[in-house]
Image: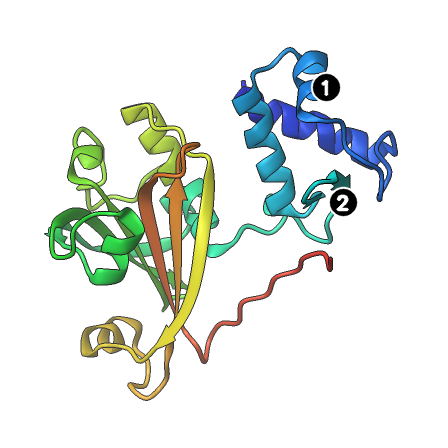
């Protein structure tokens, strides 16, 4: 069964889609939702945060939360790169594991995981192929203690998504993802792995997977050759 906040998200989405909460109307207050659904304030706050991040509602300081309607595209309809790897099984795509070891973290990863630069974390890096050609490098960074007792050291592809694997093995509960996109030139090693020209940049997608308290537990890094990929998104206009 989904967690209570996710159930509340679904209930409110159904009311918005049915017209019970039409676009432009004021959403019930936190206290009203607590009383009607019999849930705690943290559950209501978490559900409202998800609805706001997905574009279903909007918050106005001093006025409350207003309904915007169904967004043009939701995260569940079009998974972003970080979410796709978190939820999709590795067996769903061809590829090979390049690395699975404890390594010193790069500065960006250290900042996203909120750990000291050059300290060690566990890395699982996989080269993903399509139609026999390498298309992206997916790296998963997580604290050493979170990798213990998992199959992340295995050279075999995981039969489930990373999120499900960590949930079943470690009891981890993920809440949301904060994603960053950058561009940089590839390293010599990345050029070799991806079979790409060294003068073509890489698109780097960094997805910090966080718990309900906002702590980053895992960082998924997806590297995409810029001449083979484009990133598309859709969102409501405020």
Q: Position of residue 79 (x, y in %)?
A: 54, 50
Horizontal relation, residue 97 to residue 212: left or right = left
Task: Name the one closer to the observer, 188 or 159.
Answer: 188
Give yes or no for contact between labels 2 and 1 (Cβ–Cβ under 8 Å).
no
- Which residue occupies the extreme bottom position in the image? 199
Kindly identify the residue that appears in the image at 46 percent across and 35 percent down.
175
Q: Position of residue 103 (x, y in %)?
A: 12, 53
Give the image quarter of residue 48: top right
Horizontal relation, residue 152 to residue 168: left or right = left
Q: Position of residue 194 (x, y in %)?
A: 30, 72
Image quadrant where one finds the N terminus: top right
Kindly identify the residue that appears in the image at 88 percent across and 34 percent down.
19
Give the image quarter of residue 45: top right
Above or below 64: residue 106:
below
Task: Name the one closer to the observer, 153 or 235.
Answer: 235
Give the SS element for disc 2.
Answer: loop
Marked residue nearer the N-terminal end (2 or 1): 1
Q: Which colour assignment does the render follow?
A: rainbow
Residue 197 in view of the camera: yes
Q: Position of residue 237 (x, y in %)?
A: 73, 60
- Reading the image, the residue beneath label 2 is 70
Q: Which mark is residue 142?
A: none
Horizontal relation, residue 95 to residue 58: left or right = left
Horizontal relation, residue 59 to residue 225: left or right = right
- The alpha-carbon separation of the residues under discs 2 and 1 comes to 22 Å
Kindly identify the residue that appears in the image at 32 percent across and 49 percent down.
219
Q: Which mark is residue 32?
A: 1
């Amino acid at each position: 069964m989904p967690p209570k906040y996710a159930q509340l998200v679904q209930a409110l989405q159904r009311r918005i889609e049915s017209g019970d909460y039409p676009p432009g109307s004021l959403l019930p207050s936190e206290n009203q939702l607590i009383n009607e659904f019999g849930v705690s304030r943290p559950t209501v706050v978490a559900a409202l945060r998800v609805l706001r991040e997905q574009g279903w509602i909007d918050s106005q300081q001093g006025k409350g939360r207003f309904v915007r309607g169904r967004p043009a595209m939701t995260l569940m309809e079009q998974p972003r790169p970080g979410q796709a790897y978190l939820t999709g099984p590795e067996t769903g795509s061809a590829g090979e594991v390049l690395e699975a070891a404890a390594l010193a973290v790069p500065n960006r990863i250290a900042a996203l995981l909120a750990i000291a630069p050059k300290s060690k974390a566990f890395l699982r890096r996989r080269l993903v192929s399509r139609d026999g050609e390498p298309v992206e490098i997916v790296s998963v960074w997580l604290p050493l203690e979170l990798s213990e007792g998992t199959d992340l050291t295995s050279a075999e592809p995981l039969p489930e998504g990373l999120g499900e694997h960590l949930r079943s093995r470690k009891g981890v509960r993920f809440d949301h993802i904060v994603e960053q996109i950058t561009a940089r030139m590839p390293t010599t090693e990345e050029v070799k792995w991806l079979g790409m020209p060294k003068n073509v940049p890489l698109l780097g997608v960094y997805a910090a997977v966080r718990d309900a308290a906002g702590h980053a537990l895992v960082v998924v890094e997806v590297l995409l050759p810029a001449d083979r990929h484009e990133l598309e998104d859709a969102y409501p206009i405020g």
